[in-house]
Amino acid sequence: MRSIAANPYLLRTLVWALNSPFSYGYHIACLNQVQLALTCAKPPSSTGALSLPTCVPMSTNTFGLITSIFTIGGLLGSLVASRFMHRFGRKGAIKINASLICAGSLIMTIAWNTGLLALGRFLIGIGAGIAICVLPIYLSEVAPPKVKGSVGVFNQLSIVIGLLLAQLVGVYLSTPGTQRWRFVFLVSAALNIIQLLFSPTVSDTPSWLNAVGREQEAKAVGSKLWKDDSPTLASSTTTHPEEEGLLRNNDDEPPQSRRSETNIAPLTIPELFKLEALRKPVAAVLLAMFSQQISGINAVIFYSNDILSRVVPVESASYISLGIAVLNALMTFPAITLIERLGRRKLLFGSMLGTLVSTVALAVGLNTGTPLLSSIGILTFVGSFAIGLGPVPYVLIGELVPFYASSPLSSTALSLGWVTNFVVGVGFLPLRDWLSRPGEGERRKGEGNVFFVFAGAFALCVVILSRLYR
């Protein structure tokens, strides 16, 4: 990592780009954190600055709808991200995502009704969907070859730091009866304005510049990005040894030469599935991304308080929820070095094994009413996920396929992630209640059964992925 710290241009480029996944993580959590201050049952009797209301009247269902619009926007953003990356470049797509998140955040900052809140949330979702598709590719194409995996982990690290900061900011700015909750969105707008203002100081990736015929500019940018790593444009797209097997074909052409074929026209999403040589790596990335969501990670994060309130006091559940956010961030840091030392495959499957065991432990703890086992199960679940299953699939998007297939693969994989995330989020509580039965008071027996379902589906994904990704 010394090559990054010793290269101001590369460091500035990474900091500039990582605001995009940070904003994605920030907006996953920020709305829920200010719910009590933002919502009210009837119009407030007083207004604050600019004659804006101190809260927006809405029902719980309306708030849930506004929250879920983020996912709809994210899916749309992911579907169009590939086209933006082809037409405007990686940097251009990042600027579009920053503009959308900035606009949406400003609208939510001044919103005085639910329509404006929904519009702002939708625009933020589109921007986040674009961001989460572009950044894995951008990081892979600007990173020095020797630390490409480590740089790729920064994407997930920025997401979880955004989640954590949103929770911390929400604690201090979600005071009912005031307009402090508006500053939660204003912070996001300010960060994205700064990102747009600094965009002239960074360049697009050498791979994309070369693909559009700007070879001299590509060489100049590559020299500034990798001056301490003695690279060439071809080496910037060199595969990690673990990934070469997935790119091999029946012909004698080495995978490294195919990786540097930036002169080939980018594929569309339908074309991505027609090339036989890409079917195995594409299937591996899609299954890895699907496994992220089917593990139940977002169900644990979104409903951690509700889950643990069944076996521990509500006050303790709240502290454990905050601990989850902190642990999620802390356990992503080791992946920065482990991904290069252990390799992508070992780190991924070691993480998946830990996640699977933790899911079973959580299910048993909930079914037996054992607070210690349930708490340990959730914490080890999040820790196991964060160290490998969280960051590695994003890294693989930029490494397992050639340049001309990376954009459509990113759009497809992240769209699958958005859909799976939505299904798991909507179906978790109804499925949990359906698989359990009435017990004493408000508690139900068998509430851990839903995690046995997650464990079974996740175990199947692990087995199939282990055959695809060798």
Image (cartoon, helix red, strand yellow):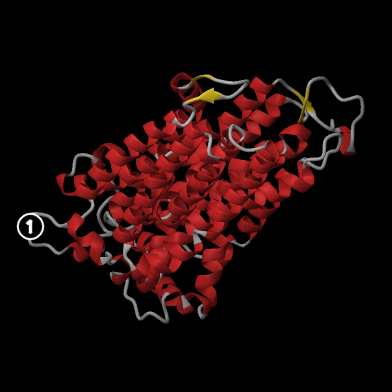
How many numbered discs sit on the rendered protein? 1
Q: Position of residue 344 (x, y in %)?
A: 32, 60
Can the viewer see residue 216 in this picture?
Answer: no
- Return the residue nearer the eye: 410 or 453: 453
Q: Is the residue marked by circle 1 packed among few (<14), some (14-19), or many (20+) residues within 10 Å? A: few
Q: Amino acid at mark 1?
A: Asp
- Return the residue nearer the eye: 152 or 277: 152
Asked whether, in this view, residue 43 is left or right of residue 456, the answer is right
Asked whether, in this view, residue 259 is left or right of residue 194, the answer is left
| Residue position marked by numbered label 1 in the rendering | 251
Give me the residue at 24% from left, 62% from top: 242
Which residue lies most toward the left here? 251
Asked whether, in this view, residue 106 is left or right of residue 381, the answer is right
Give me the residue at 44% from left, 73% from top: 225
Can the viewer see residue 263 in this picture?
Answer: yes
Give me the residue at 18% from left, 62% from top: 255
- Return the residue nearer the eye: 390 or 21: 390
Instruction: Residue 50: name its quadrant.
Output: top right
Q: Secondary structure at mark 1?
A: loop
Q: Position of residue 267 (x, y in %)?
A: 28, 45
Asked whether, in this view, residue 8 is left or right of residue 140, the answer is right
Q: Position of residue 370 (x, y in %)?
A: 53, 39
Give me the residue at 12% from left, 55% from top: 249
Q: Quadrant of the C terminus?
A: bottom left
Instruction: Residue 149: name its quadrant.
Output: bottom left
Q: Position of residue 51 (x, y in %)?
A: 89, 33
